[in-house]
Amino acid sequence: MAAQKANVSVAEIVIRELAAQAHGTVDGLPMDIIRFVLEWPGIADPVRAREQLLALLGSDRFDLRPLDDQLPKFLVLQFPGVPRTIAPPRLFAVADLLCDRLGLVSCVPDIGSTLYAEPDARFLRDDAPESAITNAFCWSDAAAPKDMHWAPIAIRANLAWAFENGKGENILVAQPDTGIAVHPELEPGMFDLERAANVLEGGNNPNDPLRAGTANPGHGTATSSVVASRIAGKIVGAAPLAKVIPIRCIEDVKIFDGAPVARAIMHAVSVNADIISMSLGGIYSPSIAAALEKAIAAGSIVVVASGNCIGFVVYPASDRNAIALAGVNAGDIPWKGTSRGAAVDVSAPAENVFVARRTPEDNGVGVVTGGQGTSFATALTAGVAAIWLSHFGRDRVRAEAERREISVQELFRLALRRSARKPVGWNANLYGAGIVDARELLQLSLADIPAPSAGVEAVISRGQSEEDRDAAAVFELAASRANLEGFDWARYGAEASFLAGDERRRSDPAKAGLVESRIRPKPTPGLNATAPQLLQRVLNRLSQAPELVAPLDRQKDAKSTFRMLLSQPGIVRAAGAPESPLQGRNVQDIQDRLDRAIKKMDGRPDVTPEARARRRDLFDRSEKLLKKAREQGGRNLVAAERADVEALVRLTGRPALKITEGKLDPAALAATEWEGTFKVNPTWLEALSERVGRIDLDGEHVGTGFVVGDGLVMTNRHVAEAIADEIRGKASSTWILQDNATINFDDRGLGSAKRFRIKSLVFAGGDTIGREVNFSHLDMALFEVETNNGTSTLPSKMAQVADRQVGETRTDLIVVGYPARPDISALEDPSTHEIRDDIAKRLGEIFGLDYGRKYVAPGRIEGITGSLDDDRSHHWVFSHDSTTLAGCSGSCVSQIIDFFPILGLHFAGRNLTANYAHSLAAVRASGQVPAAIAERLGWTG
């Protein structure tokens, strides 16, 4: 860890370390790189700016260049070779420092905000993994209409095609997106590749590489098909004769960076695009705002998705220079995932819109499937804008706008809203003037388009929560760039919108997958000191919102019904496969058992129609799954196939026993089956307990740690990622601790007598853990802590088992840690996403309301090291069934023998499935922990 020098702020240490780690060169504006967009009061002077940065950074290893020649106030500062591993609050602190030192109007980091999530048909169809991020709260399970042309028909584009020049002839639609991939539904003639661009990698090749691991590979292929697929194919776009200009500027619609999007808009302007269709969204960006102004001034029409799965309208749809689209289904009912609010102009189909789909797993074969999201409402409306322009003529439209002294954008907005059809009961406050109607739009002459309203009326979005209205107001004020109540929205607007968005996601447990960090972000001092009342309300709610979101387990391979069937002995097995009861049973027998189980669950009064339909879908596909399992012993099942049968798993629990002054409550222990197990020397448990502490940041619970060496505490790497920032690049990683990181060994985690300051990180597994479990990644970290806090000394080190064979037996164990108060997501069935009353009841029986304190949780190893999928190479993960919650991350797993030696490091779990731990002996044998550090640990045979 870089030591903080006197009179040098942490932000200054961070930015100097960024320069020290930078190496190589960079082309374009690639994703996942540390980058800041700098805005000057006037035209930026790159030479002067470079001199200032050299003086501040003490190094020339940075990349500084204009964002775009048409945006002369903006420069882009990048650090080549330094991946984006720093938490957004720290990046905003660095941005604030740069504002002060360089005299900037604004400085905004590209943080990859996840305000915008895109549901995707791949998640629940075609045997592909589901999305834990989106399915729980914005996926519709409704069947798609049989007519693949239903969406353009719903907006009456098919009727508009009969008008003269009503198919978008000679109109250019620029599409900042992921790029395009070859697909049978995308005729080469529908693209203008001479005007295309690749902002991310540089050059003009807009090909989407369809990288696995991103949420939306192929997104640009899908949206472009909705704009302009030709009539001869299976699907047809809203403007089947328009030309699409693909501009690759994102890899994932929910990973939103301002710089590449702003440059993409300016490229569209430079190639004279008539329409810019933007199916993406995130936080406020001054550079995007400036680019939108240029685009509108140049005569472009800009249509933008209002957002998905977040509630309020995100940026740039919330900008006054954008036409914002919400989404509906085939029945003219708002799609369940659409953003909504006063900023929405109109709505269009967004549920089960048929699109050209390409994925990383399709072996180059494109398909046509139903897509969901306001992305497709936007693409459809971009097509409608194209047929409007082609019908009336680009020159006539511009002349009419000029005569009225308004922009082409505003003229189209007025026409679009006037011609929209309004279903019975339509809520214009939330979903705009109505649903796009292309025929009525073309029948409305240019002269009959109504004039703009004389004034702007405040609209209260009835049906929208006060919290969502507050978030929407923050976004609106950020875009206003005003200085109100002493608050500088131009300088702090991006950070304010990030905090408002994070509060909305974090406060709704269903949106937990959209939260970037397990720890609530804290505002920079400058923003916090001057925040107006509106923003103070947001910050207050944020301070009370849940944190401690543990990594999401995508493995799904420990305790599913399927794997239990596959693991039971006694049935003739296929050659080379483990014994399995599926062998010797016919498929019909197994299906009958599944059918009975499904009917039993469907009979519950609290089961939703969506969950019932999903289980029926499981049964319909079970014959294929069961045949595959019988043939292969279940070892080669893809994640979705394992997840399917996990829908049948029921809750089974283990106790968790409260520790007070190092001792278990005899009465509580007597009520469990484990009473005889703990008839051991009580001082052994007390000695173990006193060495386990609660890791806090600013006094708030982050995880658990335990003493393993003199002055050394072990925890998870993902806990380290929550309390420290890793800067990676040319040299070895540097970790910079956030302020006030401590470990407290008090049984309740209270007081200062047993609290010790965490000084530095001395080791962490080499791979970022982030939000997902990956058994090949070592989720371990070691911190140096103070050994004397002025009141007491740090407990001595614990004994760790050096014999890796211990982790290869199904032995009894205990987990000692600090379970945190669960949020509603802890009560959710991981397969059906239903909230389970039996889970809530069980947690109540175990913990009552006493969380954040020390517990002992007995259990047993279920899956030995090397037996779990994705742990075939390292053999360093075992599964166990002790009761743990998110705050237990970093707990010690002890063998129930004399002295309770430490067997493993608990790092993750999946509700109703399994908990996972690293075998410390196996980690030691791997050699990943440097020998000098490993020698400091307290190994025992």
Image (cartoon, rainbow, N blue to C red):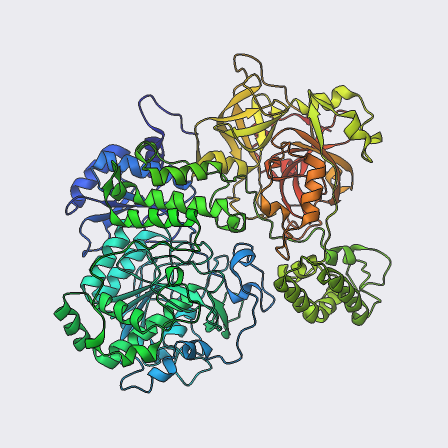
Q: Is residue 323 above or below residue 842?
A: below
**Residue 732 visible to the viewer:** no
User: In this rendering, would 829 be left or right of 212?
Assistant: right
Q: Position of residue 224 (x, y in %)?
A: 38, 71
User: In this rendering, would 589 be left or right of 497?
Assistant: right
Image quarter where the N terminus lies is: top left
Q: Position of residue 192 (x, y in %)?
A: 30, 74
Q: Position of residue 277 (x, y in %)?
A: 33, 66
Between residue 110 and residue 348, name the one nearer to us. 348
Q: Quadrant of residue 310?
A: bottom left
Q: Position of residue 627 (x, y in %)?
A: 74, 69
Question: So how many labels did they put on this image?
Answer: 0
Image quarter where the C terminus lies is: top right
Q: Quadrant of residue 482?
A: top left
Looking at this rendering, what residue extends furthest in the front direction?
Answer: 425
Looking at this rendering, what residue extends furthest in the left direction?
Answer: 403
Q: Quadrant of residue 431?
A: bottom left
Between residue 196 and residue 592, name the one nearer to us. 592
Between residue 67 and residue 293, name the one nearer to us. 293
Instruction: Identify the residue shown where x is 69% and y is 50%.
Output: 868
**Residue 398 visible to the viewer:** yes
Between residue 442 and residue 73, name the one nearer to us. 442
